[in-house]
Amino acid sequence: MKSRRFTSMAVAASQNSADGKGWALSGFGAISLSLLLACGAATTAVAPASGAEDADAVAISAKASSDYVRHRLADGSFRPETFAFGKGGVFRGTEGGAKDMLDFIDVANTLARPLANRGYLPGKDPTTTKLLVLVYWGTTRTPENSTNSIAGQNLEAANNTALSANHPQQVHFNPNDSMAPQQMAFTATAGYAIRSPEQVDLDNAVTGALAASAAEDEQRRLLDAQNASLLGYDASLADTAQTRGTALEYRQRDLIDELEYRRYFVVLMAYDFQLLRKERKHKLLWETRFSVREKNNDFSKQLAGMAECSSRYFGQNSGKLIHSTLPEGHVEIGPFKTLASDQRN
């Protein structure tokens, strides 16, 4: 699969500074889909998912670099760190995408408050801003249900047709029959069965349908693996693979079932902003991935709740794939202003 690339657009998510001049950044290169997935795959093995997921549960996976440490103030709160948002990209799992998908500005606006609650504040000066937080969001692409897929239907139809027509003709053995199987000459069998040309064609159709179904299963496996990496399920799946053939195998099946429903997701990837600005080097300091099932949910309405229950893991290691119930009630998001670019060289 070719990498889909998005140009990073860093935008200051803050109010205007005292002199009324804000800043925006662009041109820090492109972050590819393969990099986004690779960063998720780099997570170390973790414990299985905690509990079965319901339709309103948010799946959360977070990790932080070993050299990223947040210091606390005397009151126990985190020392504030400044950041700038960056547009990583939007992924639409179906043709045309979800109708309730939000624009980057709307997503950044919604994420700003949960970040602020964890001590991540909008930077006003690009020379001192610590983090560039790239935001990826969208819906996953999922495989067809195996019983409803074209390959599955073709296999079932071919198999049923072949079975119903499987009436081989019984032919008596004649030692002088040059068309008889050679092994017949060494047995006491009085006859052998042959298939009609129609039956041979039907059996060949079953073989072809089996091959198509196997190819679809492989595509399904690859798509599940891609979604697992994107959403942060990969380490838990690897861990539960050890339960195969045991009474605990249902844990892996539950995770795969979650992946095979379309999911709304957000991925936050926080990079060392000063290293990126000065040396054009990408150093990932922390990432948080959270998602919820698309069915019966509306991304534009649920994003605030998703971010709220995931925010405790911003800049932290979740230690395992977490399932957290969406909070009830309405979350009010304050005004958001996009600042003009500083055109000075």
Image (cartoon, grey):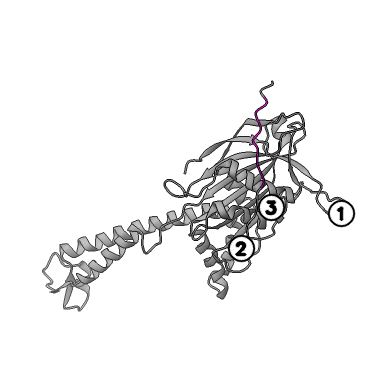
- Which region is colored magenta? 334-342
x, y (%) of residue 70?
A: 79, 49
Residue at 60% from the left image edge and 45% from the top image edge: 107
Q: Do the residues labelled 2 and 3 touch (CB within 8 Å)?
A: no
- Horizontal side of 134 relative to 274 (left or right) equals left
Secondary-structure class at tag 1? loop
Cα–Cα gap, marks 3 and 1: 25 Å
Q: Which SS class for mark 2?
A: helix
Describe residue 138's horizontal placement relative to residue 289 as left or right. Answer: left
Looking at the rendered structure, the kind of residue marked 1 is Asp
Residue beneath disc 3: 63
Q: Foreground mark, 2 or 3?
A: 3
Neighbourhood count class around disc 2 (C-alpha, 10 Å): few under 14, some 14–19, many 20 upward: some
Residue that label 1 marks: 75
Residue 122 x %, y %? 72, 40
Where 297 sits versus 171, above or below? above
